Amino acid sequence: MILKNRFHEVEKINITSQIYFNVSENRYPKYENYSKQNKKKKPGIFARLVFFYKNAKRILKIANKPNRKDYFTVFKICAIGIVILGALSYVIQLIFAVVNEAIGV
């Protein structure tokens, strides 16, 4: 009787109520599954362009133009970010000016 395991075939021999397992020479998984020849080829440039076009068309159908409220929200977020970055750079410049004066550079 031959038992098939995931990785190899095992031969089961029953001798006087003792079970022995003989492992056949094929101990490892089938490496043919991992070879480069069996891998699918990448689609060509034309197929990729068609795929990109279809995806872009689908996204443009779903997308809608933002209204005035959305634009104002984005403007507020950007303005707050610019103010925070400006204040941070001013504080860093002030710290370096004080340190340079203290060192005497």
Image (spheres, helix red, strand yellow):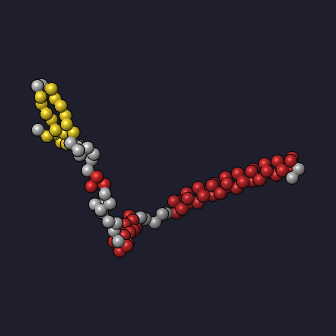
Seen from the viewer's position, the closer of residues 10 and 102 is 10
Q: Position of residue 7 (x, y in %)?
A: 25, 44
User: Residue visible at 67% across and 52% down?
Assistant: 84
Say left or right for 78 vs 29: right
Seen from the viewer's position, the closer of residues 92 and 15 is 15
Q: Position of residue 38 (x, y in %)?
A: 28, 60
Q: Is residue 7 above or below residue 52?
A: above
Q: Is residue 86 visible?
A: yes
Q: Position of residue 33 (x, y in %)?
A: 27, 54
User: Residue visible at 16% across and 29% down?
Assistant: 19
User: Residue visible at 11% across and 25% down?
Assistant: 16
User: Residue visible at 65% across and 57% down?
Assistant: 82
Say left or right for 49 vs 83: left
Say left or right for 79 vs 63: right
Q: Position of residue 55 (x, y in %)?
A: 37, 66
In the image as oriented, which residue stretches furthest toward the bottom? 46
**Number of numbered discs on residues:** 0
User: Which of the 4 image quarters holds residue 32?
Assistant: bottom left
Q: Is residue 28 above or below residue 17?
A: below
Say left or right for 90 vs 69: right
